[in-house]
């Protein structure tokens, strides 16, 4: 298949699992012999030495920019560009569709790149397209664009997605999009959960080596990931006299949490290890007994607890986050309510061996190397794309009026919003 990926970010510029997953799927499908092109944005970071030739960084990015002006009008214009329309991006997508003639366009995260106009263009040219939801992107597009302007792009409700194949990593996410954005998908949704890369897995080390419990977490170091809860629970465990350590990998509000660890007097138990590339993290997980994931309840899924479980590190996770749909409490993981008391209790179950660590670790490993393995998920993605790809009238994309219509919609949206 000729597959055109469309995403706002691509490594080395990443925020979390969404961008990494897109890159991994694109590389893997290219490895299976598909003709890939990936349209994304510039990066101010040095490009990876192994960046594929099929990555096209010609889109502009109007969001995720540090030090955005505090001026409200400037912010509103940036929001409009990010979620509604950036004319050069719309024009560039049209050019790539004309040149590449994809069998299917595989859309990922279009926040920050004028998402509404881009999806409207795909509908106008009637190219088959699918969208892989790892966050509530449809609800965010709708929330940041006034209804009258959405009408310009036939995007007031589910119409924008009526011809798309929808992939979501959890039912939890689909429900949130419907509840928050009032957007349903009557055509149905393919649920393909987060996965673990099962290649190069190291054997798990013995649990509670030298009588010490080894906890780990990885990802963005911010409140919604539960870092405050982890530090507070660590303080309680230390005061109880238990032997343990907590290693935190990732970037974010590091100084804030370093200070908090000192205040709670757990800086001798909690270490901030900085950011690591995904392959390194996957190997490191085998050294830990337990992965801490007291994330916010709206977590769409979360790759990291599945990746850790596949390496034998038992997840402690928020009971109603997306990944909880796939991991069974007491079998693959320990599920908690998102509060410090429940987290303390679960961590104590690990330190005191109140659960069979070996059996739970083996169950997580089996799940992460079978149903939740990357190769299994990739098979399903490939099948979904094949099922939706079809011959389409490529002449529709050659209509010389399309750039003019996109230009008209873009400028009319600005006039309606800003006068």
Image (spheres, grey):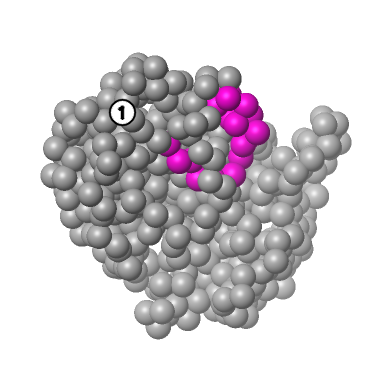
State which quadrant residue 72 falls in: top right
Instruction: Please tell me how many numbered marks the rendered image carries.
Output: 1
Question: Looking at the image, is 118 positioned above or below residue 412?
Answer: below
Q: Position of residue 97 (x, y in %)?
A: 60, 73
Image point (45%, 41%), residue name: 247
Q: Position of residue 54 (x, y in %)?
A: 58, 77
Q: Is residue 161 magenta?
A: no
Image point (67%, 53%), residue name: 113
Q: Position of residue 169 (x, y in %)?
A: 36, 48
In the image, 135: left or right of 92? left
- The residue carrying mark 1 is 347
Label 1 residue SS: helix
Residue 128 shows in this picture: no
Question: Looking at the image, is 51 positioned above or below residue 228?
Answer: below
Image point (27%, 44%), residue name: 209
Span highlighted in magenta in the image? 246-262
Q: Is residue 251 magenta?
A: yes
> 8 or 312, which is in the foreground?
312
Image point (68%, 46%), residue name: 64
Quadrant position of the C terminus in the picture: top right
In the image, 333: left or right of 298? left
> Within 10 Å of the Cα at label 1, are there few (<14), some (14-19), or many (20+) other Cα atoms?
many
Residue 113 shows in this picture: yes
> 416 or 15, which is in the foreground?
15
State which quadrant residue 338 falls in: top left
Q: Position of residue 106 (x, y in %)?
A: 48, 63
Question: Looking at the image, is 353 positioned above or below residue 115?
Answer: above
In the image, 23: left or right of 386? right
In the image, 26: left or right of 377? right
């Amino acid at each position: 298949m000729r597959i055109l990926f469309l995403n706002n970010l691509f490594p080395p510029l990443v925020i979390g699992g969404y961008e990494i997953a897109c890159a991994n799927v694109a590389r893997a499908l290219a490895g299976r012999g598909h003709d890939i092109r990936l349209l994304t944005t510039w990066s101010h970071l040095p490009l990876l030495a192994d960046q594929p030739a099929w990555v096209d960084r010609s889109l502009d990015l109007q969001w995720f920019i540090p030090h955005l002006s505090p001026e409200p009008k400037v912010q509103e214009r940036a929001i409009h560009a990010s979620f509604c329309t950036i004319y050069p991006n719309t024009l560039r997508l049209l050019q790539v569709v004309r040149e590449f003639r994809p069998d299917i366009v595989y859309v990922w995260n279009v926040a920050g790149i004028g998402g509404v106009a881009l999806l409207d263009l795909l509908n106008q040219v009637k190219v088959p397209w699918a969208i892989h939801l790892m966050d509530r992107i449809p609800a965010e597009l709708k929330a940041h664009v006034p209804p009258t302007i959405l009408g310009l792009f036939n995007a007031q409700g589910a119409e924008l997605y009526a011809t798309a194949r929808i992939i979501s990593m959890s039912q939890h996410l689909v429900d949130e999009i419907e509840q928050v954005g009032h957007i349903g998908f009557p055509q149905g949704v393919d649920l393909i959960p987060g996965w673990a890369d099962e290649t190069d897995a190291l054997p798990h080390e013995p649990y509670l080596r030298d009588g010490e419990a080894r906890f780990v977490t990885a990802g963005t170091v911010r409140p919604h990931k539960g870092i405050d809860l982890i530090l507070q629970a660590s303080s309680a465990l230390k005061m109880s006299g238990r032997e343990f350590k907590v290693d935190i990998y990732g970037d974010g509000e590091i100084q804030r949490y370093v200070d908090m660890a000192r205040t709670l007097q757990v800086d001798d138990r909690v270490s901030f290890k900085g950011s690591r590339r995904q392959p390194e993290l996957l190997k490191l997980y085998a050294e830990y007994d337990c992965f801490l994931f007291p994330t916010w309840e709206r977590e769409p899924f979360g790759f990291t607890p599945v990746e850790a479980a596949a390496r034998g590190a038992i997840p402690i996770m928020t009971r109603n986050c997306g990944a909880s749909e796939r991991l069974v409490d007491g079998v693959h993981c320990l599920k908690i309510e998102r509060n410090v008391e429940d987290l303390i209790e679960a961590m104590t179950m690990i330190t005191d061996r109140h659960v069979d660590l070996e059996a739970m670790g083996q169950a997580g490993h089996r799940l992460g190397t079978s149903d939740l393995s990357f190769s299994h998920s990739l098979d399903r993605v490939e099948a979904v794309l094949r099922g939706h790809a079809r011959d389409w009238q490529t002449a529709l994309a050659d209509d010389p009026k399309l750039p003019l219509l996109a230009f008209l919609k873009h400028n009319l949206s600005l006039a309606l919003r800003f006068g």
